[in-house]
Amino acid sequence: MNRKAKQLILACLVPIIILIGMTITPLITLMTGDDLTLRTKPIDPTDLFRGDYVNLSYEAEEVPRELIEKEVLDEYNKGSYNFDVFVMLEEKNGIHSPTKVSLIKPSDGIYLKGKLNYIGLGFSENDEQEYAYIQYSLDKYFVTENTGLEWEEASSKGQILAKVKVRNGYALLTDIIME
């Protein structure tokens, strides 16, 4: 085989190897990840649909300040934004909720890896409590065509639960269900 043929084969294989590598983490998570359920929050139905997918917001994205470790607050107060955090979860009545936010990856238990966007007051009018707003990249789910109105109504009432698979903090949204 001459040099040009080897270069052509290599040029064709590199993108294929990259694409296969990108699917390994989601596939392993789907096959071996822990199942958990997250409660979604009502969001403005006028922004809910863009085509045939649902924009989701989760209660676990708004973590009360008292659950945030000092090291996370120190990092935030230094002016860091959108840095990685690990959110420990605990199951209560079939729903998983945050119990602690840390910079250090937990050695056991179920946790999500997310990005701390900012810390600020709650969005409701009388809410004086501070929250950490964390993004998990679980915000979109494709739905069956022509079911948008039904999902929009359920979302505006906060009646959607998200089924998620998690492995080593990597989360994969597998299904949404109406309560």
Image (tube, rainbow, N blue to C red):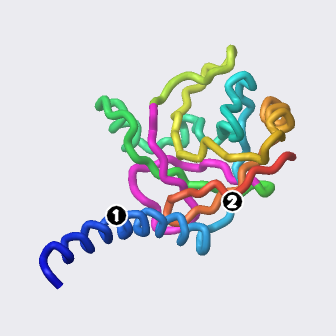
Using the rendered view, name the quadrant where residue 61 is placed. Answer: top right
Residue 93's place in the image compared with 48, above or below, is below
Q: Secondary structure at mark 2?
A: strand
Q: Residues within 10 Å of mark 1 (few under 14, many from 20)?
A: few
Residue found at the very far left of the displayed protein: 3
Residue 103 horizontal side relative to residue 87, left or right: left
Q: Could you tell me residue 140's position as x and y percent?
A: 63, 43
Magenta-span inclusion, residue 97: yes
Residue positioned 36% across, 70% down in the render: 17
Report the magenta residues as a range.
95-117
| Number of numbered discs on residues | 2
Kind of residue indicated by mark 2: Leu
Camera-side residue of 176 and 130: 176
Q: Of helix, strand and loop, which mostly describes the magenta segment? A: strand
Q: Do callouts 2 and 1 mark residues in contact (Cβ within 8 Å)?
A: no
Kind of residue indicated by mark 1: Pro
Camera-side residue of 73 and 55: 55
Residue 172's place in the image compared with 134, above or below, is below
Residue positioned 48% across, 47% down in the render: 114
Residue positioned 53% across, 64% down in the render: 26
